[in-house]
Amino acid sequence: QMPPPPPFTFIGKRVKDVFGRGIPSRSFNLELQTKAPDDVRFALNSTVAFSGSTSASVRAACHPAPGVVGHAEARASGALIAGLRSEVYGLDGSEVALSGMSNPSVSESSGTCAYDLVFRDAVRVHGNVVAESRQRTGTCAVVVKQGPWVAGVFAEADLARARLRDLGAAVAYSAPRGQVSVQASSYPSGETALTFKGYTQATPGVALGVEADRAYDTSLSYGVAAVAQLDAATEVRARVTSGGKVGVACKHTLSKFTAVTLGGHFDVREPSNKPRVGVSIRMTPGLACAELFGGGPSGGDIDEFGEEVPSCCAD
């Protein structure tokens, strides 16, 4: 059974983010995670894109102090990434994260400070500040929860030029068997966009979702998705968009630490486009690594490997 997304994370999520994970559409990879005796955890990852390009990385994470997670990554491209994620004392569910990236081969570097603060489980403030070689950007969102209602405002700014890039608001309503939300965005040029999203738990083992977007200069676009839990070890996901894109995936859990996902991505309107078919194998020896390798605050640029479904199959 797939429960509806938590109310705080509902605003801003797209249907494909909730239902589409596990549907290969761009690449596939092999990832191995393991835990060393001193509680340092490692992951080896190799990715092959459908375009033919390949990449690889080595990642490590540890607990240098209670409530603090440190992580480091080295990529085959030459990029080096390191960061810390820490809980905020006195604010349950709150986190602050710092990360930095450097790639000497292309003379690029960046730094990110992300924050996710929850006050009395009723008000959430989250966002980030990103400093790159050529620009400085920042985001901030304030979300308020009252009973079944959640409402929020959000903004993105170009800090170097001191001007807004995006400004918007959203409201969501949660019921026992589903949720709906409406989100509106406005840009400095006067452009606007409107998004509707809805989820429902059709049966104990089947969840359905629908999303519709209407931008200022485009026609209405929409998507429908579903996830079904066939049994305790098998899950099927499917997604169809108004553009004729169809995605299907089947995930089977062989054991507590091993899962295999088979999936495909097809364009029914353009049969000449080759179908994309992929296989994902996830092996996690020892204890599960999600606690250490999970993503940081929602506005952060923290790596999210270790999530329930491997990123190789995310759209």
Image (tube, rainbow, N blue to C red):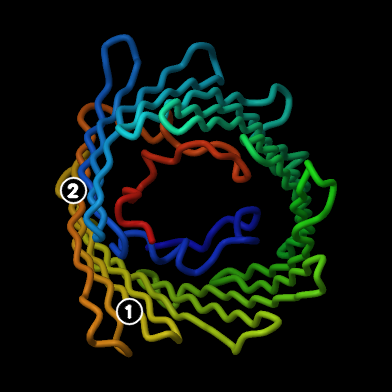
**Image spot of residue 254 (x, y percent):** 14, 49
Mark 1 crowdedness (10 Å alpha carbons): few <14, some 14-19, many ≥20: many
In three-dimensional space, the C-alpha distance between marks 2 and 1, rounded to whole angstroms, equals: 22 Å
Residue drawn at x 49%, y 39% as measured from the top left: 295
* Viewer-side residue, 155 vs 196: 155
**Viewer can see residue 237:** yes
Residue 97 relative to residue 103: left or right: right
Pointer 1 residue: 246
Image height of 2 relative to 134, above or below: below
**Image spot of residue 27 (x, y percent):** 27, 56
Which quarter of the rendered picture does the N terminus lie within?
bottom left
Q: Kindly check if marks 2 and 1 are in contact, taking CB atoms under 8 A apart as contact.
A: no
The amino acid type found where label 1 is placed reads: Val
**Local secondary structure at mark 1:** strand
Image height of 171 relative to 304, above or below: below
* Viewer-side residue, 235 vs 17: 17
Residue drawn at x 74%, y 66% as measured from the top left: 170
Image height of 218 relative to 176, above or below: below
Q: Earlier in the sequence, mark 2 or mark 1?
A: 1
**Local secondary structure at mark 2:** strand
**Image spot of residue 136 (x, y percent):** 71, 40
Pointer 2 residue: 281
Residue 296 relative to residue 168: left or right: left
Which quarter of the rendered picture does the C terminus lie within?
bottom left
